[in-house]
Image (cartoon, rainbow, N blue to C red):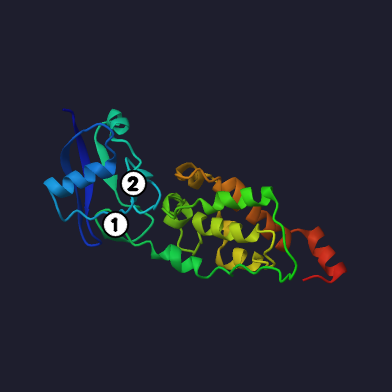
Amino acid sequence: MLDVVLRVFRGDGTSHEERVYTVPVVEGMVVLDAIHYIQHQHDSDLAVRWNCKAGRCGSCSAEINGVPRLLCTARVDALMAEGDIRIGPMRAFPLIKDLVTDVSYNYAVAKQIPPFTPVDEPTPWRMYAEDVERLQEFHRCIECFLCQNVCHILRDHASPFAGPRVLVKIAALEMHPKDTLDRSAFLKDAARVGMCNITKCCTEVCPEDIHITDNAIIPLKERVADRYYDPIQWVLRKVTGRS
């Protein structure tokens, strides 16, 4: 039976170390299986957040060999070709213990988003298939926050930035054909969508293959640019009297 060497981050906000474990490999094993083996056979106090083990809940987000991934979908046999497997917590969020981080920032920012505000129509209303398909992509998000973790704006800048996941949530509202609210001011001032320089790193790590940059962030940036920085749009609003 083959063995694999895992180098796992252990510690909290005061001290930490990298511990080395040897785990026997079984067919179909994923990294979360290896972590469970370590818990059962070596260190029962190893902290890891997980739930479904099926790539649907987004709980087991971590960094594997420096890349943000879900522990339950990363195959051990595929990673063994790179040598030892290094596993650590998401670096964009405060560390709680071992592989568990405090992701409450994401929920706090999401609560600030102006809610869905539909048009008040007493008559039956139809939604076209293309509108449904566009919104359905955004609703595939499992809130693993890998996109938030890999975002260098959130990692490296002190200024508040909503992050890719929150912008996807806003896009789902803004692009709903029945929504009537203009969130341009929120996008510019609170979410600070202008800080995103569209490197597409968030799109690359999304396990649900959501085109975060192209389909959500860029359209939102364009809306803000039209609203606040397009001189032609400014003149038209003055002429027509629209705010």
Specify whether residue 241 is in view: yes
Specify whether residue 218 is in view: no
Classify residue 14 by image quadrant. bottom left
Residue farthest along the left direction in this orientation: 42
Image point (61%, 48%), residue name: 215
Amino acid at dot 1: Val
Q: Is residue 147 left or right of residue 2?
A: right
Query: Which disc is residue 100 wearing?
Result: 1
Q: Are marks 2 and 1 in contact (CB under 8 Å)?
A: no
State the SS at label 2: strand
Image point (37%, 59%), residue name: 93
Q: Residues within 10 Å of mark 1 (few under 14, many from 20)?
A: many
Q: Is residue 206 above or below residue 231?
A: above
Residue farthest along the right direction in this orientation: 239
Q: Residues within 10 Å of mark 2 (few under 14, many from 20)?
A: many
Image point (51%, 45%), residue name: 203
Amino acid at dot 2: Glu
Q: Is residue 204 left or right of residue 79?
A: right
Q: Which residue is mark 2?
A: 63
Q: Is residue 193 above or below residue 212?
A: below
Image point (49%, 47%), residue name: 202
